[in-house]
Image: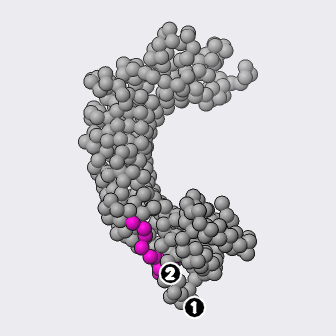
């Protein structure tokens, strides 16, 4: 290392990110110490200040001293606890050069921080040139005093307590977002998002599962929504990946534009209204990968099984389907007595290559076996069938007989069928 030119040494040391490693480099030699100001990233993990020597000076001051030594700091990641004044001092030094900022706020239960003015969130506004902002464990019940972040493309908020108007203000401050992630967020009831550049969006709302969402983003390509009962997305011509789930409430209404570009659709939850299920299946006629794990239907509190779904009509309506993950309720609906009565001699499932089936009950075993055989018979491109048998809640011998039938079916078609 001593024989390397200064420029090469600076290039090598600039790749070091962990703050403790950067600090250690300062102790090697004067030449190394003169090179460490050219680091681009400083990362302070939670254990950064566990030693007695660091606690005497204080985390805020140590971070400030290290930030002040860097010529052009582009990324700052702080996972250890810090104060509002500490954050303000760092950003006063590096706010103009920072492109990526990640902070573990940890103020969800901080009553004192609730009344602070300016707050930690307010001070983030000093980093006006940010391209990426990630916040963990943040209380957002008061609108931050931000102007516009003209270059912010990625916003991630993980584990937050929010209020609708505050979240709206935050999103309005980020007009050119292309990626938005709200994960494990509590308190949202009704959210309207209008971001013209947004391409990737993942929303995970914690609570009763009764949120409403309106998303107007003409360039949206990937959308994942958890915890919403009413969803409206009118502009969807670029949407390729869509996932809708609700583990706590019901999905009552979905309103989407044409899904002509959709390749992947995931529908999950305890209960969906049947109209919502039918609408999504009808809109997703071009889908290539369909994942369905909805337990029940029914418009109100009563949990109802799926009505019969015609096997032939379903696959004729989804000609491009290549992979199909079917959970118990959907599989049972395809296995009704009349589902295979009207099979035309020319009927085929042209592109289906893989099917994963979850079976939870031995009821209607004959129809279920017939459906499995039909998937093999008409799936001309089928290469893999996985049958998952879960929680057979029956002490009757029919469960054993059904399992024997599936094992026999697997033995006869061992090159394609696998049991898990």
Asked whether 181 or 360 is in front, the reply is 360
Residue 94's label in the rendered image is: none
Q: Give the range drawn in magenta.
A: 304-316
Q: Residue at x 64, y 13 (%)?
A: 27
Determine crowd level at label 1: few under 14, some 14-19, many 20+ residues with C-alpha closer than 10 A: few
Q: Residue at x 67, y 15 (%)?
A: 28
Residue 351 shows in the view = no
- Asked if the magenta segment contains residue 4, the reply would be no
- Asked if the magenta segment contains residue 307, the reply would be yes
Kindly indicate the quadrant of the structure image that contains residue 355. Answer: bottom right
Residue 131 image position (x, y, % from top left) = 43, 39
Side of 365 where 330 appears, left or right: left
Q: Which residue lies furthest to the front in this view?
A: 396
Q: Is mark 2 on a helix, strand or loop?
A: loop
Tag count in the figure?
A: 2
Which residue lies under the disc numbered 1?
Answer: 345
**From the viewer's perspective, is residue 14 above or below residue 219?**
above
Image quadrant occupied by the N terminus:
top right
**From the viewer's perspective, is residue 126 above or below residue 254?**
above
Side of 390 where 153 appears, left or right: left
Q: Which residue is drawn at 42% across and 38% down?
A: 159
Asked whether 6 or 81 is in front, the reply is 81
Q: Which residue lies furthest to the bottom in this view?
A: 345
Kindly indicate the quadrant of the structure image that contains residue 153. Answer: top left
Which residue lies under the disc numbered 2?
Answer: 337
Image quadrant occupied by the C terminus:
bottom right
Q: Distance of mark 2 from mark 1, alpha carbons?
A: 19 Å
Q: Which residue is drawn at 67% across and 73% down?
A: 405
Residue 192 image position (x, y, % from top left) = 29, 51
Camera-side mark, 2 or 1: 2
């Amino acid at each position: 290392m001593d024989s390397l030119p200064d420029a090469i040494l600076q290039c090598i040391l600039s790749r070091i990110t962990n703050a403790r490693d950067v600090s250690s480099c300062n102790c090697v030699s004067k030449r190394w110490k003169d090179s460490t100001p050219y680091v681009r990233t400083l990362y302070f993990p939670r254990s950064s200040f566990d030693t007695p020597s660091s606690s005497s000076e204080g985390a805020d001051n140590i971070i400030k001293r290290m930030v002040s030594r860097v010529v052009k700091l582009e990324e700052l990641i702080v996972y250890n606890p810090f104060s509002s004044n500490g954050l303000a001092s760092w950003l006063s030094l590096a706010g103009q050069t920072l492109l990526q900022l990640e902070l573990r706020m940890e103020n969800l239960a901080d009553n004192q921080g609730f009344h602070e003015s300016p707050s930690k969130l307010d001070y983030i506004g000093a980093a006006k040139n940010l391209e990426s902002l990630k916040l963990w464990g943040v209380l957002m019940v008061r609108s931050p005093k931000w102007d516009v972040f003209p270059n912010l493309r990625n916003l991630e908020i993980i584990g937050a307590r929010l209020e609708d108007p505050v979240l709206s203000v935050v999103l309005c401050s980020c007009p050119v977002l292309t990626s938005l992630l709200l994960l494990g967020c509590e308190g949202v009831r009704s959210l309207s998002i209008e971001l013209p550049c947004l391409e990737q969006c993942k929303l995970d709302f914690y609570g009763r599962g009764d949120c409403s969402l309106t998303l107007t983003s003409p360039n949206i390509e990937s959308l994942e929504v958890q915890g919403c009962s009413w969803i409206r997305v009118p502009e969807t011509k670029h949407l390729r990946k869509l996932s809708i789930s609700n583990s706590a409430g019901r999905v009552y209404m979905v309103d989407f534009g044409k899904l002509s570009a959709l390749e992947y659709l995931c529908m999950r939850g305890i209960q969906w209204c049947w109209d919502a299920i039918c609408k999504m299946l009808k809109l997703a006629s071009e889908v290539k990968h369909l994942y369905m794990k909805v337990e029940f239907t029914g418009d109100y509190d009563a949990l109802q099984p799926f009505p019969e779904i015609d096997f032939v009509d379903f696959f004729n309506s989804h000609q491009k389907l290549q992979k199909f993950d079917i959970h118990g309720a959907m599989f049972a609906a395809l296995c009704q007595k009349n589902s295979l009565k009207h099979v035309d001699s020319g009927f085929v499932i042209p592109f289906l290559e893989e099917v994963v089936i979850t079976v939870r009950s031995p009821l209607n075993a004959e129809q279920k076996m017939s459906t499995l055989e039909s998937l093999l018979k008409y799936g001309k491109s089928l290469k893999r069938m996985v049958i998952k048998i879960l929680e057979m809640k029956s002490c009757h011998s029919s469960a054993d007989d059904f399992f024997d039938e599936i094992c026999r079916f697997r033995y006869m078609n061992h090159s394609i069928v696998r049991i898990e």
